[in-house]
Amino acid sequence: MADMTKPEWQAQKTYDQNRADCRVKATRPPLTPDEEKRPFAKYYYDEIPQPDPVHYATMDEPMDPADAIYPEDINRLLDVPALEAGVEIGWCNLPNGAGYIANRIHYPQFTADMVDWWFAWHPLEDLRYRIWYPPQHAGIMLSPMDRARILDDSIPNREKNWGVVHNVTENCDNGYENIDIAFRSPADAGFDMEKFDKVAATMAGGMGWAVTVDKTDESITAPALMVHMFYDAPEGGLIHRTRFWMGYRFNEKDKPELCLPPGVSVPVEAVQGLARHNVKEYTRWREFLPRIHAELGSGMYC
């Protein structure tokens, strides 16, 4: 049972409670009276901005797989001139069957500190996750151990999620899924830290594992590697580059490993759906984060 001696947002759910709640919240119900009292509840009712039509249309058809970056070559994300000369927005199935997604967005008003705060702040309460992209974000929870790490004031915001798992429920254009996202430090994600510290402003990434909310014995479960890279933009703000590799995981040696059976590919609908979802949720984030950070970005508690 949830600990009712604490404020509702701090009460620790069980995994079964979280799964049951998410089935309801996936319908985007009205907020409860307690949720309405939260200082950020108003963001749940925002008019959600639509993606730039040209940007969004880039996800209509697959890109050439020859222009993709493989997870084994993750340090290519530190070669900015080469990235700018390549394909920055698109998706495809790689020849080995894996799904690949690339996206790029400029955030004129962002700083790395804002990004680090957000990735630490929002998993503490599922309403914080739901207000990010209400049309498709249904809920989030942390284990007691992971919650304690994020609330530890001695750990910098940038490091709070290292080793932490976000248990999220979201719809990536193919129905609601429960996704466990295990975040990693840049070093544990495979980056050369000497180069990383010279090029990147910050990063959030790791490995996710997804299964449909209405799981059956026949449901497909699949891992994916994910990295959100942020770079200082010459014109001000940050450049955000996203990469997903669906069908990959980290092996016991912390190296990227394809885990699809021979001859099997990640369904095209799943790859394109995640690509489109990424454009939509980060279009929303672009105008949303500066507002909520200005209001609440002084800490974890509110």
Image (cartoon, rainbow, N blue to C red):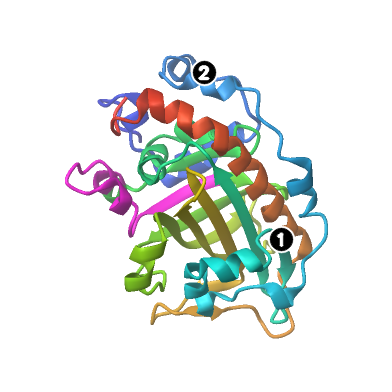
Residues drawn in magenta:
147-169
Other-residue count near label 2 (Cα within 10 Å), few / some / many at <14 / 14–19 / ≥20: few
Q: Is residue 214 left or right of residue 161?
A: right
| Residue 56 placement, left or right of 203 | right
* Observer-nearest of 59 and 137: 59
Q: Position of residue 63 (x, y in %)?
A: 77, 67
Q: Residue placed at 53% from the left, 31% from the top?
A: 288
Quarter containing the C terminus: top left
Residue at the spot x=39%, y=39% of the render?
Answer: 114
Disc assigned to residue 90: 1
Q: Which residue is outermost to the left?
A: 154
**Taking 251 as reference, is 149 above or below it?**
above
Residue 165 lies, in percent from the top left, at: 40, 54
State the CA–CA distance, disc 2 to disc 1.
Answer: 33 Å
Q: Is 37 a magenta residue?
A: no
Q: Which residue is mark 2?
A: 42
